Structures are given as C-alpha cells and as structure tokens.
Amino acid sequence: MTLNTVQRDIPSHIDGYGNTAEKLYSGAFERMPEGFGRGGRIRAVTPNDRAKLLSGVSEAISASGLKSGMTISFHHHLRNGDYIVNQVIEACASSGIRDLTIFPTALFGIHKDIIPHIKRGVIRRIMGSVNGPIGALVSEGGMEIPVVLRSHGGRARAVMSGDVHIDVAFIAAPVADIGGNISGRIGKSACGSIGYAFTDALHADCVVALTDNLQHYPIAPVSIPGTCVDFVAQVGSIGDPAGIVSGTTRVTRDPLRLLIAKYASKLIETSQYFRDGINFQTGAGGIPLAVTAFMKEAMKNRHIRGGFGLGGITGYFVDMLKEGLLKKLMDVQSFDEEAVKSIASDPRHIEISADWYANPWNCGAAVNWLDVVILGATELDTDFNANVNTEADGSLLHGIGGHQDTAAGAKLTIIAQPLMRGRIPCLVDKVHTVTTPGEVVDALVTEYGITINPNRPDLIDACKEAKGGDELPLVPVDELRARAREMSGAMEPVWQDERIVGIVEWRDGTIIDVIRQIRSAR
Amino acid sequence: MRRTMLYLPGNNPNMLTRGYLFGADGLVLDLEDSVSVNEKDSARILVREILKRGAFGECEVTVRINGLDTAFWRDDVAAIVPHGVHGVRVPKVESVGTIKALDEELSSVESAASLPAGVTKIFCLLETALGVWRAYDIASASPRVTAIIPGGEDLTADLRTNRSASGVELEWTRRMLIVAARAAGVDALDTVYPRITDDEGLRREAEFIKQLGYDGKSVIHPNQIPIVHEVFTPSEAEIEKARKIVSAAKDATRRGLGAISVDGRMVDLPVVRRAEFTLARAGITDNEQRGQEK
C-alpha cells in the first residue's frame, strides 16, 4: 500500500495505465518538468498541392491515415449539441477501425450513442472527462482500461509534454475556409471560443476540421490557422444550436442559493483581493452567477474596477465588460449567446487556449493571475479536499474541468453550495474521491455561513474585523460537519470492488486518486 | 422586532429546518392553509419534531394552527405548545369567544407542560369583515393577544372583491386595524404580499403600511425579507437625528431642564419616544447609544 500526500492508497501498478511509483501526488506545486516538449508530425504542403477539401467524415478518416489502436481527439465547445463525436465514431466502426483511444476535452449525454461502440471494442480507452451515461458505464466496470481524468490545464500539459500523443484531432468548426483556417465565432453552429481545440491542433500528427459552414480563403478572424490543419471536410451539420449555447442565463431566485451567493460575495468583498484590478472567475452555475451579480453591485458601490474575467464566459461578464467594471475577458469557452456575440465583436474579449488558460507547465497560465474563483463540488471533507468527480454512491459522473487549475491558481478559492443536496451532505469526514486537494481550497460557503480553511488565518481575521459581522457568519468546519451529520444521519460506506476504473490525475500529471468499480450488490 | 414574519409550510422539512437562515425577525410554521387535510397529522408531527430541535437562530417562533372551527386545533395546540413556541397564530378570528376558548386551552396545555401561565402569545388573523369590525374587542380579549393581522385572500373574498395590484380593497381595513391595535396596545402586522416576483410592488406596499404605523409584515418568500427590512430600517440620517434627540433629552433630564431644542426645533415627549423607537428599530441598544455619546 502506498499513500500519496492526500492519504490515498495508490497501487504501484495499474493495469492499462502503468507503474505509478514516480507519479504519486506529493503537493500542489511539487512536480516540475524536465527536458523538452513534444510536437506533432512535421508536414509540408507545396503550392501545387493546396487542396485540403474532402467530402465527408469517412473520406476524412481515410485521408488522415487513422488505423486501429490510434488516439483521436475532440473538443467539447458544442457541448450537448455536438454531432461530431458520434459521427466520427460511427464512421470508424463502419470502416472496421477498432481499439481506439478517444481523447475528448469532455463528453456529454448526447454522446451516449458511442456506448455500443465501447461494448463492441471500437473504443478501447477514454482519456478525458466523462459525464452522464458514459460515466455510469465506466463506474459499473464497462471498460477494460481505466479512464484517465485530467483538468483542462492538465490535459494541455499531457499533450505538450508527450504523456499523450494524438494521432488525429477532429475539430468541429462552426466556420472554416478551404485552406483550413477555423473559427467558432460565426455560423449557425457558432460557439464563440474554440480554445480547447488549440493544443490539439498544434500537437496532433493529423488535424481534420469538420465544418457545416465552408468559406473562401481566408476567413477573418481566424482562431486556428490553416497552417496546422491537414484536411477540411464538409458535413451536413456539426451540431444542434439549441444544445450548443443557452440563451442568456438569469440569476437564480432560489432563496437558498441567493443566501449562499450573498455570503460568498461578502467574503470576497472583505478579503484583501477586493480592490481595483481584481481578476476573477465565477462560472455559469446558479450560485456563481448570483455571486457575480452581488459582486457587480459591490464593485459599483465601492467604485472598484476589475481587471479580467476568466474561464467560461457568460452574458453577465459581458455586461461587466460593457459597463467598464472589467477591462478584459479571457474566454476559453463561451457559455451563452451574449458571450458568443461579444467575442465576435469586441477586441477586449480575448479567445484563449486551454494551455494559456490553465497549463501548469508553461511560462505562466492565466489562472496564475486569478485573485478569486468560485467553484462547486459534489462533496468536501474536513481537510477541505474537494470531490467533483464521483457522486455519493461512488459513481463517476463529472469531469474535472478547470476545477484543479483555478483552485491552484487563484489567491482565494471559494467552494459555494448548499450543505445538503436532499439528504446527502456536501461536507463529509473523507471525500470519496479527491479531485482538488484542501491545500488549494480556502473557504466553503453554505447557507449556514462561511467556513474558512484553518491554513488561512488572514481570511478568518479579515472576517472577524469586518463591519457588519452578521453578514459574515463564521462556522468552524467541525461544527458544520456536525450539523450535516445531525441532518443526514450516518452514511453507509460506498460498496466498491478493488478494480480501478478511473484515475484522477492532478494537473501536473501525478495521481491524486483512483476510482474503483462500484458494486451493486453487497 | 416583528418587521418580517416568514411563513414556512408545515409539510416541508427543507424549509422548516433552514427557514431561519434567511434573517426574518419571526417564523410562522404553518399547519393551516399550506397543508392539505390528509397531511394535517404528518405536518403536525413534523412541526413538533422541528420545534424539539429548537434550531431557529434569533427568530421569534410561532405556529399557525388550524382554526377553532376545525377538528384539528386542539391537537395542534397540544402538539406544539409544550415545546416552547413564542406564540400561536390563529386564523379567522371573529369573536372574543374564540380568543377566550383558545386562551383556556393554552392555559391548560401550559399547566400540564409546567410552563409559566400565559407564556404563549396569540397572534390574531382577522380574515372576515366581522373579525375586522370587532378588531379592538378581539385585541383586548386576553393579555395573551400580542398582535392583530388583517387577512388577504380570505378577507377580500368575504368583502366580495379580489386583490388588486394597488391594494385599494384592503386600504380601509389596514387603516382601521392600526387604530384598533394601538388602542388595545398590541402590534399591527400586515398580511402577505402574494406576488413573489414583484419586488417593486412589495416595496410600495411595505412603505405604505410602514407609514400607517404598522410594526411589520408577514412574508411568504425569503426574497421578500430584505426588501421589507430595508423599508422598515431607518436611514442613516434618521438614525443620526434620533441619536441627537435622545441624547439631548437625557442631558435635559440630568440637568433638570424641561423643554429642550435640537437643531433649533423644540422637542417634546412624543418626539423623544419616536426617536427612541427609531433607534430600537435600527437595532441600536442603550449601550451603543451611551458609547456614541462618549
């Protein structure tokens, strides 16, 4: 038995993953890179050979040289509206290609159509976040090789350092020209930023753009230049616009969530980071959006102008940019229609890659400049370790996203959520899966108040010294845990087998935890 | 203070356990209209168990029992009173007799539970024209009566009208009840504002009843609390003026002076009392006031 520094038992060898001795998590900023990075295959196109246009997915697969056993990648900017993953896997299956490793930035419910291909061996391995039904399949032992979960930054790092080699990157392109220049900003399937696809485009051996909006050479503006795109294939539709971007999200009226958001906002306002130039990321969930709304009011009242808003960008951030409360938006993923419109028209709204966003192994990712981030988690423990991957029954249902990266990068990391989800407490003695270590989580905010990590006495003092103390009720973590236990009663342990079905990498490539197969019967 | 009293459905454990977190001055755990007839028993048991836990922060805790014209009210009283509620809110009060009957029942349950006699207060809902007409008599019927509250939906139905955005149909009732409440020496608390997403409408109504002299308002959604509190909380300027008046009055008493003046205006006893009330409403205690004077 070998424990890493968050006290998780990691076997010395994991079938389908390899030896782990050199890869045990040992601290948020401990592992440092050595040597040189990796790139894709070097290609050349002569002036007489400039045609990249192919007629469809099957022809693209054939032209790319894709063979059984290779690794293919996808981005998830089309979210639950994406048609490309299903189309490519279907075409691979028809061509007799098997044993693929798929390396998506995320999978969604719409991708459940690939489950039969997993069962038939077309897909042998998944590296990337698995949500919904595919997560459930993995949890129940439906894949022979364990899934490897990485954060957005950790994924970019894995590609650039050579941990993962992409044979063919399939990039869904809301607009592309015949020379392979790509953008997400226009077209019926517009999704705004295509930041997650950049790293793949730069490092894959072969890059295929799939588009339903082909234009003359060149389009403008360009996100990914045609210099790294081998082929452009036309498809009928890359996705369902209704599933790609939502309408403008409204701030919740759920009083419990508003209360939590108010406490989180007060904590930020009380901290030393609430000053001119504050950079922050709040995300698109109900509570984070409400925090954004409260912060906006507070910024106006105290005449504070922020620096940049980061991450998944919503209409709320766009409004703050327009009103001068933020100077820039750094957008790796555009969440709603307002964000898509803004990135297409406002030069202060910058499209950034996953590498720029969050990679721990480059010369400085944007997350390093964050003052504050608001995050959620399925559960937290009394050491402030956060689990965003598995549910209370132990099943794998969520990816890491930027959780690890922003928590590590921000000076103030707040997890904001209700103490109970139905009968299930969000604060437990030990989380089932450690996704993000407590050393980079500063506070948990619930409807009962603000619970600060004891390793941040400066924050505790700031809250105690603040005016209007009843707006900043401090609840020690043990007291909050006792309250949760009183309501939920004792929780039965998760029944699981020894077999490992998932590996959770910390953003530096070390193993922070493993996920075991759940057992339905005792 | 009773600026806000938040209704919590008696059959909703989620709200019953967490309702106090929203910062209302009081809670009304409801066994009446929010609970269907076939859920009366289970809601009563749930409310009883929640009361036993006693986790309500600083809130004044009351229970709206079922009316005395139903078969449920005695069981309601027997289940909740022994566990220490501040009061019961009783619906559709129309007569002094109703209050006397409830008073007797409360006394009997208090005695059996070894509680001090009269500790459980009565909040009267006047939801019919007859109840409103007899407001003063009802408010004076027992020392337990601590507040009278006009009805909303039921009362407008009884008046053969309905609730409008302007609230004109309840205007006279509200004016009458404040007079009856003050005459009887009890609080006047307003009915709920039912349009839970209309923040501006709520603010207008709260400003209106505050100006009439009401002590507060019942609320049916946590998001209504900060709006009503804002209306009922004195402004910085009002607080500052009240501080000056109270301070000058104390100084005058110390020095044996009669009439005093503040900022060039004569100040008499009612003005001093109003200033003291303003400070109380702002949550400023005597100690804080003394600290300010130093």
Image (cartoon, rainbow, N blue to C red):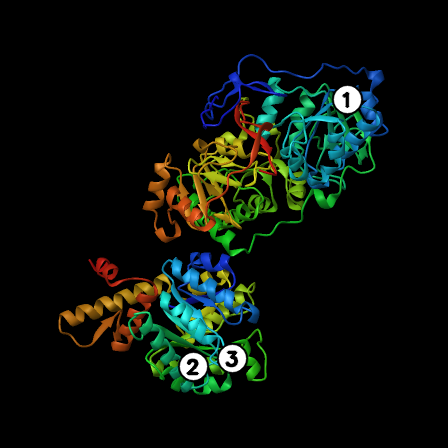
Q: Residue B253 location, x and y as percent? A: 16, 72
Chain of the residue under the numbered disc 1 shown in the image: A
Residue shown at the point (81%, 33%) measured from the top left: A214
Q: Is residue A165 left or right of residue A371?
A: right
Q: Amino acid at mark 3?
A: Leu
Residue shown at the point (21%, 61%) measured from the top left: B290
Q: Residues within 10 Å of mark 1 (few under 14, many from 20)?
A: many
Tag nearer the camera, 1 or 3: 3
Answer above or below: position of A163 versus A223. Answer: above
Q: Residues within 10 Å of mark 2 (few under 14, many from 20)?
A: many
Q: Nearer the viewer, residue A221 or A285?
A: A285
Disc nearer the start of the sequence (3/2): 3
Q: Is residue A413 left or right of residue B266?
A: right
Mark 3, residue position: B170
Q: Nearer the viewer, residue B29 or A53?
A: B29
Q: Residues within 10 Å of mark 3 (few under 14, many from 20)?
A: many
Answer above or below: position of B270 versus A13. Answer: below
Chain of the residue under the numbered disc 3 shown in the image: B
Mark 1, residue position: A230
Regarding residue A437, the answer to whether it shows in the image is yes
Tag nearer the camera, 1 or 2: 2
- Local secondary structure at mark 3: helix
Mark 2, residue position: B177
Q: Quadrant of the N terminus of chain B?
A: bottom left
Q: Residue A452 location, x and y as percent? A: 40, 40
- Mark pair 1, 3: CA separation: 75 Å
Residue shown at the point (41%, 68%) measured from the top left: B80
The answer to whether the residue labelled 1 contacts the one labelled 3, judged by CB atoms less than 8 Å apart, is: no
